[in-house]
Image: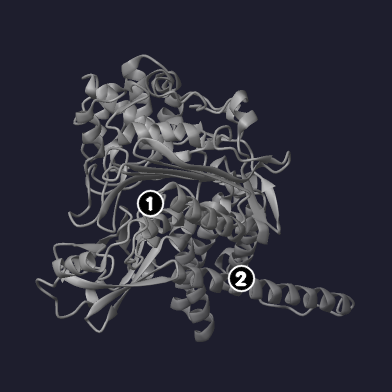
Amino acid sequence: MKKNIAMLLCFFLLLIPIHSYAANHPPKNEPLSITTENVTAFADDYFSEAMEKNHVPGAVIIVVKDNEVIYEKGFGYANLESNTEVDPKQSLFRIGSVTKLFTATAIMQLVEQGLVDVEQDVNSYLTNFQVDTGAYSTIKIKHLLTHTPGFDERIVGMAARDYQERGSLEEYLKNNQPQVLREPGKYVQYSNYGMGLLGLVIEEVSGLSYEDYIQQNILGPLGMNNTHVLMNVAAEEQLAHEYAFLGDQYHPLPLYDFYFPPAGSMISTAEDMAAFLLFHLNNGTWNNTTVLQPQTIAIMHERQFSQHPQVQGFGYGFFERLSHSHRFLEHGGNTGGTNSFFMLDKEQNVGVFISNNSTSGALMTYSFIPEFIDNFYPTTSSVAQLEANDHKVSSKEESLERYTGTYYTNRNSQEDISKLPVLLMANIHIQNQDNQALLLNSFGEEYTYVQKEPLVFVHPETSQTLAFEEDEKGNITHLFFSDSFVYEKKAWYQEPLFHLILLVLLALIAILTGIVHLFQLSRRILARKKNENRIEQKVEPALPWYSDPRQIHQLLCWSVILYLIVFLIGVSQIQQTVDIFFVLPTLMKIALLMPFLPAFIVLLQGISLVRAWISGSESLMIRFYYTGVCALSLCVILILRYYNFTGL
């Protein structure tokens, strides 16, 4: 059981945006030049230490500068079973969501040809089904490119356990359409489904399959001959196997694939990814071929959306990173067992691609980029002072109390059970420091931000910005952080910790009641055996069970115990971190239906307690106790509903 829970936690760590938390490092004063010698010394030290610390069997890196590969190296093993070492030229790594950059590039090719308009409704390109936005406005192509369509997140069931079982892209998108939760174009919520839709647009407009289009129009022209759009037998032979490190050993992960390849299914070598880096660094031309015109790729690289002018945002497909007086373009990719990262610095003509093959390697991958920037892009003291002067307070609020609280990423599902672990981990705590500054705590690290103006705070050493949004009453509703994502402020009664306390309390009451009930039953059985030969005394007829608060209370507690047993067994059937990508185990499905039983019993108890309070048939203490447990049970049922643990 501990193994399964640990594996689930590792998986959910991959779902949340973590790449910019490490970016708030104080600047250094002496930058290193980006040369083969310096990068080799830095990367060799970093990978040798980080791989051991994070239990990563294999990793790869390639760095390009000024149209040349200045460093490439494989570390460790691509396949532990065959002792195959990582080779940057031959070892294939699943690049996960870095695939989205290829999809965005393909869309921009079609924009350049006049076949797609970023301002156009996506439904105008779909022939066999339409996206239902409900009461909201239409979803435009540009919303899909900037992760602002407003779609809910679906994790469960988004992958086939065997890549050969993957069906058509169109059928999956048609039959698994998520809800639209917010107005398109208003808030970022990272969307795999949205990028899948762009892949379908490519198919509809070009008349080619997504795979054939990418191969013919991007991979072929760039000479990326060792890259595969979809998993296949040939790719499987060169693939860096994925592992989870648990119990002091590596466990191989299944070779699954996503139902929406345009969002995360490509496989490539580090050397091939260098060609894609150089293509973007050279304004759309590489390998003597122009894949995108300079003006088109410039639009793709420009900021196209941001939640606030002073926080980083998105290009078309790319995340921004604003750090150390530079603007970087980047995208990460996680498949559950492979962790990749792609970064561009167009100003200095530098590109980096890295990848590793372990679930526990996510933090290693995402901490590499901030470390790389710290070593090769330090902000000098004079520049840091100039930036600090730019952030002098223009108008300071007397009290900062309204900003305090806990903020949770809006990238959590309203439809499946992935919501709870994401909310438990992906949160930011804000504290008021004597109305002089805000203290931000996330993933155990603390940073101090001083106010620049109402709703805007800045880190004095790195100049990174926190921006807030308020409603018409002046209440803070959202936080926009340096990772380009959106965090929503929750009230105290929405806190997962508060919910957990209620869940544990009800579980303890149910278990103790069950134990007492079993003890009482055993005593009654023994008493009946002793009294078998005695003359039975006349007793008052008991209330029917459905009208007796005592019996209903016992029944309620047993239903809770039964739910806990089925739920925990269901969790134990999730054997690998990536199993949550597939359909849920049968017992987990049963567990999702079981809350309807205690809900019905709570209704009966409510009716019986009304009668008890009117008639005074029970003692005052007993009535308060049963009423409290009934109310607690109702709260827990609502909590289960909030976290999508009721219904399939």
Question: In the shown orientation, is residue 409 left or right of residue 187?
Answer: right
**Residue 69 place in picture, x, y as percent:** 43, 38
Question: What is the secondary structure assignment of the residue under circle 1?
Answer: loop
Which residue position is annotated with label 2? Answer: 510
Which residue position is annotated with label 1? Answer: 411
Query: Which residue is painted at 66% across and 76% down in the image?
Result: 540
Mark 2 or mark 1: name the one nearer the start of the chain: 1
Instruction: Classify 335 as above or below 310.
Output: above
Instruction: Classify 633 as above or below 300.
Output: below
> In the rendered image, which quarter is residue 233 located in?
top right
Residue 233: image tag: none
Question: In the shown orientation, is residue 233 left or right of residue 203?
Answer: right
**Residue 530 place in picture, x, y as percent:** 88, 79
Q: Which amino acid does label 1 sit on?
A: Arg
Instruction: Classify 622 as above or below 83.
Output: below
Report whether residue 619 is seen. no
Query: Which residue is painted at 29% across and 37% down in the image?
Result: 145
